[in-house]
Image: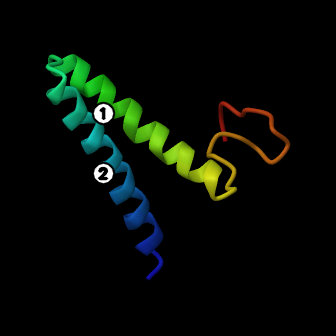
Amino acid sequence: MDKLPLVLDLTGTFVFALSGALAGTRRGLDLFGVMVLSFAAGNSGGITRDLLIGSVPPGRSATGATSACR
C-alpha cells in the first residue's frame, strides 16, 4: 500500500508523455521532436498537477529557494 502513490504518479507521468508523443506523431515530427515533446509534456503535466493541488514541486524548498542538491 506504500507504493500506491508512487505507482499512480508514475502512471500519470507516463500518460502525459504518451499524449505528447501522440501529438508529435500527428503533427509529423521526427523521432527527436516526438521525444522532446513527450519529455516536455510528461514533466510539465506533473508540475502543473502539483501546482493545482497546492503541493510544493520537487526541487523547490518551502522557502522558495531552488536547491540543486539534496
Q: How many numbered marks are there?
A: 2
The quadrant the C terminus occupies is top right
Whole-Å distance between the Cαs marked 1 and 2? 10 Å
- Between 67 and 27, the one lying in front of the other is 27
Tell me where residue 68 appears, x and y as whole percent: 66, 30
Which residue in the rendered view is the most extreme toward the bottom?
1
Q: Amino acid at mark 1?
A: Ser
Residue occupied by mark 1: 38
Q: Check the picture and name the quadrant holding the N terminus.
A: bottom left
**Marked residue nearer the N-terminal end (1 or 2):** 2
Residue at horizontal 69%, vertical 50%? 56
CB within 8 Å, label 1 to label 2: no
Residue at the front extreme? 27
Q: Nearer the viewer, residue 5 or 46?
A: 46
Picture coordinates of residue 14, whole percent (x, y)? 31, 50
In terms of secondary structure, where does tag 1 sit? helix
Instruction: Look at 31% across and 23% down and name the residue there.
Output: 36
Quadrant in the picture for residue 3: bottom left
On the image, the x and y values in percent for residue 18 come to 25, 43
Q: Is residue 34 left or right of residue 12?
A: left
Q: Residues within 10 Å of mark 1 (few under 14, many from 20)?
A: many
Q: Which residue is mark 2?
A: 15
Relative to the observer, which residue lies in front, 68 or 55?
55
Figure check: 39 above or below 1: above
Mark 2 is on which residue type?
Answer: Val
In the image, taking residue 31 as reference, residue 65 lies left or right, namely right
29 to 14, vertically: above or below = above
Residue at position x 38%, y 56% from top?
Answer: 12
Crowding around mark 2 (Cα neighbors within 10 Å: few <14, some 14 to 19, many 20+) is some
